[in-house]
């Protein structure tokens, strides 16, 4: 069985900014195996955000190829990309991005709505996902009735509910205090321990330290790619 | 995205901004209110005019041969009016000639009218319409007899001094006592009451029960017309087609009798419910012609308002659209969401408009004699127009939303 889940080959991305041509990615090669826990780091302007959009299938490369779970997504049209995002990717954002008027449960159900899952099944799976992140008792609360950490847990439940190939978190602790940050990072650690592939985009070394592998981008290229020593607090199971 | 999910979402958006939503659907609301109310008023008016007005004043399938119009609804020139004034009066001989020569089966009644004063037991009733006529008049007017009996053609032949009262006179003059057999003074001439006509109600607020009817030949005839002269000759056919045939026949017979050349106009006038109603028909037509214009203007305005509200909604919820796209919403999902939301907004306006229109129709029915009734087709049309306006108004904003780039949308604050 192929354990490779992401394969990037010579990915480039150019933008036209007025009369200037900006090269955000200048040929990135990267392979990520199933159940890896990878942090993508880099200073601002390194191409980190473009990389995140590319991995999340929100953007398509100008050149090169991207295979996600066996599909070549680099040449896909809008609606096919939408389907891939729905089935293969679970997003966790810095600002949570929950729908403010919907309950936690309704927020978690959202990806299932677009996957065409029936109402009953949707509810059951959303409840399971919320229980998995420890929010079984707060399902009917609106985002503004939840703490930052709880909101991010809802977002994680939403990202997991469709059983995606990768969990893609963009600065997931950027809006949280350090205690809550640790809490959220523990959730990621647990999910990884349960077999989930986790990709973390961050500029904070403390956060990146939770990952097993750290890829550093600089000027649109992979600058370094190294393994972290296993953390002492890891479940090691 | 499933349809009901979209509708539920739309309602939650509407609920979230009640006041703004209400203002945004006022245009559609007014348009549909207009539609429902005007249709029900015009239709009520139609029923009222054809059934009550025409039926009460002229009689069904009936026309009258007169020297000039009695009910004048439309405008007429002075010239025309002078012409009518010069027309010779209708006589009992004219009536006999028509009755003898007409081939279309019909019922006939000669009649004369005037306003007189009634008196009984020291009580007076002024300005009462006196009709002197034939026995068949009761059938032509569909008068039911509440008490006693109508007079017979035999009584007409002998000139009996008998009188049949309108309901209100029976009530007011006799104050609960039985009027049958009493002798009342009709313009100073004594007549015996033999019957009371059942209650007719009102027309435009005027009582239709203040009248007395005597035989054409009764002593009271002297108060009405010179000998042999009548005011009108009622002719009632069996159905509308027969009535038109009878009118053509009467026109031909009268022209022969009066010796009119083809170039000369008629020197008599045939009054029918149709003629009296033709003016109303013109008004109704104008209303029905103006209605689509009025409704269209308010709906176009309503649609533009909704479109703007939806564009604002798209702008305000750009980030939400980005999130939905990131979570797997396709273009058509976003498109459907905003079109359904727009249509829901508009239909809500339409439903409120239907409610307001129905209330208005009921208010008119309660406060006026018009039997204003809500036409089911206008309700259907109202809902349909609501859906249509909402969808059309929603297309452009929904397209804008569906074309948003998820990265840009997510970046928006």
Image (tube, rainbow, N blue to C red):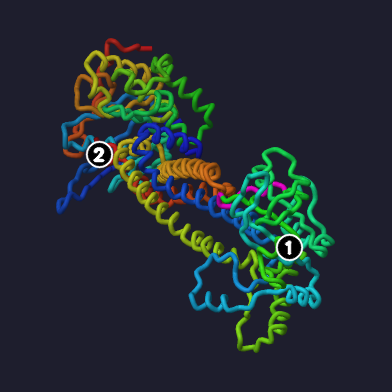
Question: In this view of the protein, which residue sits in the foreground, B388 or B26?
Answer: B26
Q: Which residues are magenta?
A: B198-205
Could you tell me which secondary element the residue under label 1 belongs to?
A: strand
Q: In screen coordinates, is A160 left or right of B218?
A: left
Residue B346 location, x and y as percent? 44, 44
* Discs 2 and 1 lie in a common subunit: no
Decide: few, some or many residues near mark 2? Use Cα within 10 Å; few <14, some 14-19, many ≥20.
many
A149, above or below B163, in the image = above
Q: Main secondary structure of the magenta part?
A: loop
Q: In screen coordinates, is B205 left or right of B309?
A: right
Q: Residue at x 46, y 50 (%)?
A: B34
Question: In this view of the protein, which residue sits in the foreground, A25 or B189?
Answer: B189
Residue B200 covered by magenta stretch: yes
Decide: few, some or many residues near mark 1? Use Cα within 10 Å; few <14, some 14-19, many ≥20.
many
Q: Say which residue label 1 marks.
A: B133
Q: Is residue A7 visible?
A: no
Q: Which mark is residue B337?
A: none
Could you tell me which secondary element the residue under label 2 belongs to?
A: helix
B95, above or below A16, in the image = below
Q: Say which residue label 2 marks.
A: A50
Residue A186 location, x and y as percent? 31, 15
**Closer to the eye: label 2 or 1:** 1
Residue A189 location, x and y as percent? 33, 17
Q: Chain of mark 2?
A: A
Q: Residue at x 29, y 26 (%)?
A: A38
> Residue B215 falls in which quadrant of the image?
bottom right
């Amino acid at each position: 069985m192929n354990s490779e889940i992401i394969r990037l080959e010579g990915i480039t991305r150019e933008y036209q900014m007025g009369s200037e041509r900006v090269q955000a990615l200048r040929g990135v090669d990267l392979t990520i195996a199933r159940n890896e826990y990878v942090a993508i780091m880099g200073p601002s302007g390194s191409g980190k955000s473009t990389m995140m959009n590319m991995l999340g299938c929100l953007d398509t490369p100008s050149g090169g190829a991207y295979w996600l779970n066996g599909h070549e997504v680099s040449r896909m049209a809008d609606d096919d990309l939408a389907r891939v995002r729905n089935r293969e990717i679970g997003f966790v954002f810095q600002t949570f991005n929950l729908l403010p008027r919907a309950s936690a449960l309704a927020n978690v159900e959202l990806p299932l709505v677009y996957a065409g899952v029936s109402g009953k099944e949707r509810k059951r799976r959303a409840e399971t996902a919320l229980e998995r992140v420890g929010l079984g008792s707060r399902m009917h609360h609106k985002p503004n009735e939840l703490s930052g950490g709880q909101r991010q847990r809802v977002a994680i439940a939403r990202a997991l509910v469709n059983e995606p190939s990768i969990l893609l978190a963009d600065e997931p602790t950027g809006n949280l205090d350090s205690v809550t940050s640790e809490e959220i990072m523990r959730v990621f650690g647990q999910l990884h321990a349960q077999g989930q592939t986790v990709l973390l985009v961050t500029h904070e070394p403390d956060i990146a330290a939770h990952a097993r592998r750290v890829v550093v981008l600089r000027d649109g290229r992979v600058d370094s790619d190294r393994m972290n020593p296993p953390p002492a607090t890891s479940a090691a199971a | 995205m499933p349809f009901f999910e979209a509708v539920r979402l739309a309602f939650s958006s509407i609920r979230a901004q009640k006041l703004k939503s209400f203002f945004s659907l006022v245009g559609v609301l007014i348009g549909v209110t207009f539609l429902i109310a005007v249709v029900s008023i015009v239709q009520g008016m139609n029923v009222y005019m054809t059934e009550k007005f025409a039926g009460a004043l002229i009689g069904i399938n009936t026309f009258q041969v007169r020297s000039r119009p009695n009910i004048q609804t439309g405008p007429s020139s002075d010239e025309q009016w002078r012409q009518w004034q010069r027309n010779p009066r209708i006589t009992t001989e004219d009536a006999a000639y028509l009755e003898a020569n007409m081939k279309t089966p019909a019922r006939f009644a000669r009649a004369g009218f005037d306003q007189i004063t009634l008196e009984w037991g020291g009580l007076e009733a002024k300005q009462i319409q006196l009709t002197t006529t034939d026995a068949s008049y009761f059938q032509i007017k569909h008068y039911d007899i509440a008490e006693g009996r109508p007079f017979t053609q035999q009584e007409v032949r002998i000139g009996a001094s008998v009188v049949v009262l309108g309901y209100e006179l029976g009530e007011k003059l006799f104050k609960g006592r039985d009027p049958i057999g009493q002798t009342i003074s009709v313009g100073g001439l004594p007549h015996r009451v033999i019957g009371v006509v059942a209650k007719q109600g009102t027309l435009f607020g005027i009582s239709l029960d203040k009248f007395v009817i005597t035989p054409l030949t009764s002593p009271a005839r002297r108060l009405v017309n010179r000998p042999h002269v009548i005011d009108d000759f009622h002719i009632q056919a069996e159905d509308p087609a027969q009535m038109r045939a009878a009118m053509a026949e009467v026109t031909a017979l009268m022209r022969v009798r009066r010796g009119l050349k083809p170039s000369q106009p008629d020197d008599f006038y045939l009054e029918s419910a149709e003629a009296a109603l033709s003016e109303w028909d013109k008004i109704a037509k104008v209303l029905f012609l103006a209605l689509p214009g009025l409704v269209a203007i308010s709906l176009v305005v309503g649609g533009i308002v909704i479109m703007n509200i939806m564009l604002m909604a798209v702008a305000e919820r750009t980030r939400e659209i980005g999130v939905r796209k990131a979570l797997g919403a396709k273009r058509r999902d976003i498109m459907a969401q905003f079109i359904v939301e727009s249509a829901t907004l508009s239909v809500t306006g339409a439903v409120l408009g239907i409610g307001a229109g129905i209330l208005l129709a009921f208010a008119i029915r309660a406060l006026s004699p018009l039997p204003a009734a809500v036409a089911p087709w206008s309700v259907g049309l109202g809902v349909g127009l609501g859906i249509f306006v909402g969808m059309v108004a929603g297309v452009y904003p929904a397209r804008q939303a569906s074309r948003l780039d998820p990265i840009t949308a997510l970046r928006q604050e």
